[in-house]
Image (cartoon, rainbow, N blue to C red):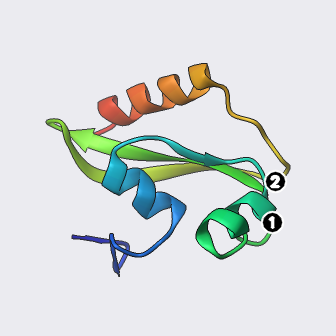
Amino acid sequence: RRWDGAPLTVRSPMTEAMREGRVVCYETSAERAARWGEPAPTGFEAAALVPIFADARVVGGWSLAFAGPRRFSDEECAFLITLGRQAA
């Protein structure tokens, strides 16, 4: 399977969210670099990557990116996965 022209085996926050079917968050660009080997895109610091489901199968993903550092609560992540299950 592929995402945005890249195989889902590529190590990135979005492919991890899509492979594992869960919200993946990072609070700072440094955290992203430590976990996935590259910093956040220019102009962004934190993000939540959300899988999109159709009939219990991941069919895509979307991201919420923030210019500054941001902590994501368990409640926010639960809400985001609910949105991902309703989006397709």
Spot the residue most to the top: 75
Question: Badge 1 is on which residue?
Answer: 43
Question: Badge 2 is on which residue?
Answer: 67
Residue shown at the point (85%, 50%) measured from the top left: 68
Cα separation, mark 1 vs mark 2, equals 6 Å
Residue shown at the point (34%, 44%) measured from the top left: 21
Residue shown at the point (41%, 76%) measured from the top left: 10
Q: Is residue 44 visible?
A: no
**x, y percentage for residue 81?**
43, 32
CB of mark 1 within 8 Å of CB of mark 2?
A: yes
- Quarter of the picture containing the N terminus is bottom left
Residue shown at the point (71%, 69%) measured from the top left: 33
Classify 13 as above or below 26.
below
Classify 28 as above or below 4.
above
Report helix, strand or loop for mark 1.
loop
Q: Amino acid at mark 2?
A: Ala
Q: Quadrant of residue 60?
A: bottom left
Report helix, strand or loop for mark 2.
loop
Closest to the observer: 58 or 34?
A: 34
Spot the residue most to the front: 34
Judge from the rendering whether residue 78 lies leftward or rightward of residue 73; answer left or right: left
Judge from the rendering whether residue 76 lies leftward or rightward of residue 85; answer left or right: right
Q: Amino acid at mark 1?
A: Gly
Q: Earlier in the sequence, mark 1 or mark 2?
A: 1
Q: Quadrant of residue 42?
A: bottom right
Q: Is residue 26 visible?
A: yes
